[in-house]
Image: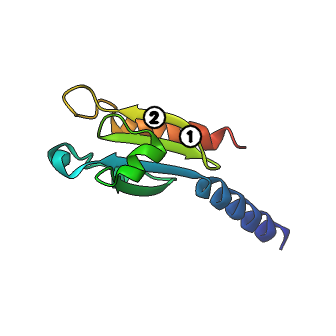
Amino acid sequence: MKKYYNLILMSLLCTSAFAQVEAYHFNASWNEANNVEWFNKISDAEKKSMSIDDAAIQKKYEILIVPTIVIFDDGEEVERFQADLSFQMQATREEIQDYIDELIMNKF
């Protein structure tokens, strides 16, 4: 029985750690050709896509170039991946996933 309690406890701890990490993908309607298509394949983080066509979003998150992916931990920005001057994301899915995985592992 104790084994099951430990398993449930570990599941709850893992779930709470994952829920604290968020990844936001910012782009604009005029730059849809450069959308980060693999963004939704990132795991272990809550994901949200937003358009900077809404100037309030652009200002709030200080987005200067699109696409941009911002990683938050407990609501605080911890990393930002931005496109180059050609408006194409240079970071790979693996780089961003590795960053998220390391962030989560450091919580334990």
Tell me the residue that label 1 is attached to: 77
Where residue 108 appears, as percent x and y from the top left, is 72, 43
CB atoms of marks 1 and 2 within 8 Å: yes
What residue appears at the point 29 percent right and 29 percent down from the top-left corner? 90
Q: Nearer the viewer, residue 89 or 51?
A: 51
Mark seen at residue 105: none
Secondary structure under badge 1? strand
Indicate the quadrant where residue 12 lies: bottom right
Indicate the quadrant where residue 5 lies: bottom right
For this view, does 9 lie left or right of residue 88? right
Point out the residue furthest to the right here.
2
What residue appears at the point 60 percent right and 39 percent down from the top-left corner? 103
Where residue 73 appears, as percent x and y from the top left, is 61, 45
Q: Amino acid at mark 2?
A: Arg
Q: Nearer the viewer, residue 28 or 79?
A: 28
Secondary structure under badge 2? strand
Tell me the residue that label 2 is attached to: 80
For this view, does 35 lie left or right of residue 6? left
Q: Nearer the viewer, residue 11 or 19?
A: 19
For this view, does 104 lie left or right of residue 63? right
Where residue 58 appears, as percent x and y from the top left, is 39, 46
